[in-house]
Image (cartoon, rainbow, N blue to C red):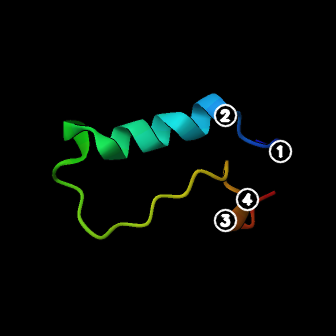
Amino acid sequence: MKRYATNEEIAQMYLFLASNDSSYCTGGVYLSDGGITSGLM
């Protein structure tokens, strides 16, 4: 994506993890880095 995340984008990840929608997620690592760590940039 070649840009930094907005505050709203990071907040959406936190809201998802704090909600019941993430109740089936266990022990995962969730990156909100726009693909930077994938090495494809």
The tag on residue 38 is 3
Q: Residues within 10 Å of mark 3 (few under 14, many from 20)?
A: few
Image quadrant in which the C terminus is located:
bottom right
Instruction: Determine which residue is flagged by label 1.
Output: 2
Q: Residues within 10 Å of mark 1 (few under 14, many from 20)?
A: few
Instruction: Determine which residue is flagged by label 4.
Output: 36
Q: Are marks 3 and 4 in contact (CB under 8 Å)?
A: yes
Rendering coords of residue 14 (x, y %)? 45, 43
For marks 1 and 3 on the same chain, the one whose residue lies earlier in the sequence? 1
Going by the image, does 1 lie left or right of 17? right
3D distance between C-alphas at marks 1 and 3: 12 Å
The tag on residue 39 is none
Q: Kindly report which numbered mark, 1 or 2, lies closer to the viewer in this rendering.
A: 2
Q: In the image, what residue type sits under mark 4?
A: Ile
Q: Kindly report which numbered mark, 3 or 2, lies closer to the viewer in this rendering.
A: 2
Q: Does 2 appear above or below 37?
A: above
Instruction: Determine which residue is flagged by label 2.
Output: 7
3D distance between C-alphas at marks 3 and 2: 21 Å
The answer to which of 37 and 21 lies nearer the viewer is 21
3D distance between C-alphas at marks 1 and 2: 16 Å
Q: Secondary structure at mark 4?
A: helix
3D distance between C-alphas at marks 2 and 4: 17 Å
For marks 3 and 2 on the same chain, the one whose residue lies earlier in the sequence? 2
Q: In the image, what residue type sits under mark 3?
A: Ser
Going by the image, does 26 lie left or right of 1? left
What's the residue at 35%, 66% (across, down)?
28
What's the residue at 83%, 44% (across, down)?
2
The answer to which of 10 and 39 lies nearer the viewer is 10
Rendering coords of residue 16 (x, y %)? 36, 39
Q: In the image, what residue type sits under mark 1?
A: Lys
Q: Are marks 1 and 2 in contact (CB under 8 Å)?
A: no
